Amino acid sequence: MERKKVIQLEDIYKRFYIGTPNELQVLNGISLTVGEGEFVAIVGQSGSGKSTLMNIIGALDRPTEGSYYLDQVDMNAAKDTELSRIRNRKIGFVFQTYNLISKTNAIKNVEMPMLYAGMARKKRLERAKELLTLVGMEERMHHLPEELSGGQKQRVAIARAMANDPAIILADEPTGALDSGTGRMVMDIFHRLHKEQGKTIVLITHSPELAEETERLITIKDGNITGERSGRDRQ
Amino acid sequence: MIIYENIRLALSGLAANKMRALLTMLGIIIGIASVIAIMTVGNSMTTSVSDSMASMGANNITVGLQQKADEEESTEEGLQFGGPPRRETAEDEDGFTVEMLENYCETYRDSIQAISASEDVGSGQIVEGSLYANVSVTGTSLGYFVANSIDILTGRFFREREFDDGVRVALISDLAVDNIFGGDKETAVGSQVQVNVGDKYYSFTVVGIYEYDQSASGFSSSSTKDTTTQMYIPLKTAKELTHTENYLQFTVVTTTGVDADTFTETTENFFSPYYRNNRKFEPSAFSMSSMVEEMTSMLGTITLAISVIAGIALLVGGIGVMNIMLVSITERTKEIGTRKALGAPNSSIRLQFIVESIVICLIGGIIGIVLGVALGMGLANLLGTSASPSVQSIVLSLTFSMVIGLFFGYYPANKAAKMNPIEALRYE
């Protein structure tokens, strides 16, 4: 069955310090396609270029060369304000360090992307409650981030990533700051979102064990894709 | 909607960091408070000065003597502020003669409604057994009662015959009646009173009682029992008591429609020739309306000058706000990066920090206004004038503090808006 293509990267190059003696090429012509509903892991050592790739996939950065279509939208043609809009509607970020807004409670954190999407207050609140319930945080909706444990914070962050029902969830080392027990729990949530809601998830990690859990495992080294194989989650 | 969220966000941010918020606002608070306090005091002083001057009659021109050349002090008897009369060295022969006045009246018959001359006999007491009332005995011409609004409660004014013949009749205040006759005005009118002025006793018949105007007397504070009020007697009677013939000062009441300022000059020019040979004095005339204008403009200038200083305080306060905003966005770099990753456009980030800065300044402004009004009213009370905080200055201050917030918040907010999201996210 031909899946709808959510991410289409073609011949992506990324260079830094262009035109200076220490010009640095981080991505060397990466091509990658991710279909709807896939759970993909991108694995690589630090310095392999996986963070740069993530920034490009996440519309935080633009490639120096190559084309990128996200959900059929040509990202090279999008202006900065459009990129903001695309990040808001089509991408759900989950960070290693959670990045919840301090002094703002869990529910307000989850509401934030919806606020930028211009959703009505009542609807926002409703959706935020629903999402927090989905990640098992319904008891702590009114807690501030500093009152939550690492695992709890990451669950709130996942709920926030889901807020505008994005085309992809982009998780950058989501268990990197967690112990194995809570890390497991967070991974289980991703699996659930994948299976139950059919979410497209891109997991960036340096841990081969976590990557093994996904459907598809892409290894990246020195700015090139060096390996791709199916994980054990392959259905 | 985003604005409302931003205001809420800014408020919770301030609440979470109370000490810093207070210190940030302090500059604005001090600036606004001083502006409001100064404006309140300035306003109430202007109002009270012009009120008391207007009650003396804005159409009146006071003509007196002024020392020539180096000495600036005038020989006027300090009537304008109700302070103690100043004794200068102008002698009776320096004064305006009856002849001069008659000439003057004749020349400007159409412009002059009345001439009010007075003769200060001195301070004394009406004594009645153990009862007393402090009075200042003043001889008055017929015109005096035209120039000064005096309300007769009981009895009557002096008759023309009494002015002409120098009869010993008197008008006393209701306050004096309270002290001597226990407030019985009917008994008071027609009765003889003994007045002690400068070691001498004089006997006067009370013909009328006027209402003592407390507000016109300025800063009197002592009990009503010791308050000194005017006892009016006919001018000629007073002249006999002081053994003088000429007038050191008089007031001209102009007819309506005459420009007081121009007529002031005309009057001065009229009397000048008489004093060409006088080595010490020259005539000087001034109108109440020009005095009022002068005082108002002077107070206005002082208010403006201090307001400029307060404005500098506000500027410094604004720079303080900008400084804290810059610190704040640096501290919250990661938050800004996160917001951008979540899809906040630059305009939203900019708005968020501008709103925060405006909220800080507005709250500072409101606290400043409350403090300023309190301070201004306190000061005005201390000065004995009634305070009137002007709505205009409050609205102006609120607007101004918002503008400060906008102005000094824009640069930090713009800096935040332009942050690179990747670098901001990486910031620790």
Image (cartoon, coloured by chain):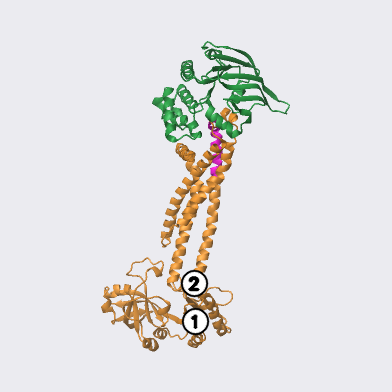
Chain colours: A green, B orange
| Tag 1 subunit | B
Amino acid type for the residue under numbered disc 1: Ser
The local secondary structure at tag 2 comes to helix
Of pointers 1 and 2, the one earlier in the residue sequence: 1
| Tag 2 subunit | B
Query: Is the residue A110 above or below the residue B162 in the image?
Result: above
Q: Do the residues labelled 1 and 2 touch (CB within 8 Å)?
A: no
- Residue B341 visible in image: no
Query: Is the residue A6 above or below the residue B209 in the image?
Result: above
Report the span colored magenta.
Answer: B319-339
Residue B97 x, y percent position in the rendering: 49, 86
Which image quadrant: the C terminus of chain B?
top right
Amino acid type for the residue under numbered disc 2: Ser
**Residue drawn 46% across and 45% down?**
B363
The local secondary structure at tag 1 comes to loop
Please tell me whether residue A138 belongs to the stretch shown in magenta. Answer: no
Residue A156 x, y percent position in the rendering: 46, 25
